[in-house]
């Protein structure tokens, strides 16, 4: 049991009085509160100040209106362009530059497609090989190839000349084949496209560049760069050539020009 003296009781009362005094002491007010209450939207701003939220809303509204207007203008322009393009291009002629289309020029130039040419022109493998060679020789045309084949073999892949033993579409002789690395033994048994591949070797052998005709390469490749009036053969001196190819000659003379004319160059 605790025993309190008069002195200890007085001290306790004094302490309690001081504590009460501190608890009732007024709090010092400051100019800066601990937080700033949020302004109500309907509270007017001080003069000279603008509301940043209102400014953003106005800018957003303006930009939205601009976007809507521009979108509408673009859509109208797109529809207008589509209509205009339709008017311009609906009847546009599509130009086919493929070898097969070029082959139609044979008919346009000669008045009719050479008999036997149709089969070659419908041969996809043959025409694809023509495309490959045209990439290699830009001046090579289907028209000229058709004329040479017609003049040499009349489009017969199995043709063999009984006198010269020349074979195939391009009538390659054994000596010419050997010189150019052509498979002479199997030439007349090959397809048209394979024969064309072999013929490419012949063009390579003579450095074909399209500046002269394929016809002169057939008849006299060493004269390929000569002028049209250059005499290649004469009937009196080259009787055998005349007998085999009388169509090259005019008045007993075969010139570069007359040979080119025969092959339609």
Image (spheres, rainbow, N blue to C red):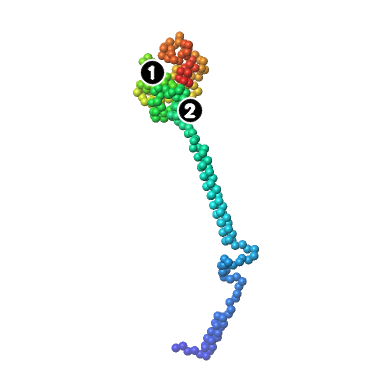
Q: Spatial distance from mark 1 to mark 2, Cα to Cα?
A: 28 Å
Compare residues 17 and 194 and report the one nearer the observer: 194
Q: Of callouts 1 and 2, which one flags the residue occurring earlier in the amino acid sequence?
A: 2
Residue beneath the point at 55% across and 48% down: 73
Secondary structure of residue under mark 2: loop
Q: Is residue 162 visible?
A: yes
Q: Is residue 129 visible?
A: no
Judge from the rendering whether residue 246 lies leftward or rightward of residue 41; answer left or right. Answer: left
Residue at the spot of label 2: 138
Where 19 falls versus 82 (above or below)?
Answer: below
Residue 195: percent from left, percent from top: 39, 24
Residue 132: percent from left, percent from top: 43, 29
Where 33 falls versus 58 (above or below)?
Answer: below
Evaluate if marks 1 and 2 touch, with contact meaning CB atoms under 8 Å apart. Answer: no
Quarter occupied by residue 21:
bottom right
Bin the neighbour count of mark 2 within 10 Å (Cα to Cα): few under 14, some 14-19, many 20 and up.
few
Residue beneath the point at 60% across and 62% down: 51
Residue beneath the point at 42% across and 19% down: 151
Q: Residue furthest bottom?
A: 6
Residue beneath the point at 61% across and 71% down: 31
Compare residues 246 and 195 and report the one nearer the observer: 246
Quarter occupied by residue 243:
top left
Residue 102: percent from left, percent from top: 46, 28
Quadrant where the N terminus sits is: bottom left
Residue 260: percent from left, percent from top: 47, 18
Q: Residue furthest top?
A: 236
Compare residues 2 and 46 and report the one nearer the observer: 46
Question: Mark on residue 192?
Answer: none
Residue at the spot of label 1: 166
Secondary structure of residue under mark 1: loop
Q: Residue furthest right?
A: 48
Bin the neighbour count of mark 1 within 10 Å (Cα to Cα): few under 14, some 14-19, many 20 and up.
many
């Amino acid at each position: 049991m605790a025993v309190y003296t008069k002195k200890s009781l007085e001290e306790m009362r004094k302490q309690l009085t001081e504590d009460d005094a501190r608890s009732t002491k007024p709090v010092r007010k400051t100019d800066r509160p601990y937080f700033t209450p949020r302004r109500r939207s309907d509270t007017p701003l001080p003069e000279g100040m603008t509301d940043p939220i209102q400014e953003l809303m106005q800018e957003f509204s303006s930009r939205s209106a601009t976007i809507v207007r521009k979108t509408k203008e673009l859509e109208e322009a797109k529809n207008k362009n589509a209509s205009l393009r339709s008017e311009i291009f609906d009847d546009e002629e599509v130009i086919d530059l493929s070898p097969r289309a070029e082959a139609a020029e044979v008919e346009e130039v000669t008045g009719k497609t050479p008999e036997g040419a149709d089969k070659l022109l419908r041969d996809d493998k043959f025409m694809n090989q023509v495309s490959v060679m045209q990439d290699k020789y830009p001046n090579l045309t289907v028209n000229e190839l058709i004329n040479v084949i017609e003049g040499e073999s009349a489009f017969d892949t199995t043709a063999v000349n009984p006198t010269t033993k020349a074979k195939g579409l391009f009538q390659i002789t054994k000596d010419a084949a050997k010189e150019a690395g052509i498979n002479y033994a199997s030439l007349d048994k090959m397809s048209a496209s394979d024969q064309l591949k072999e013929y490419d070797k012949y063009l390579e052998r003579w450095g074909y560049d399209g500046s002269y005709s394929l016809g002169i390469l057939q008849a006299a490749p060493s004269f390929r760069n000569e002028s049209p009036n250059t005499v290649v053969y004469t009937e009196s001196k080259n009787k055998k050539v005349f007998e085999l190819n009388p169509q090259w000659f005019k008045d007993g003379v075969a010139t570069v020009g007359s040979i080119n004319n025969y092959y339609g160059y």
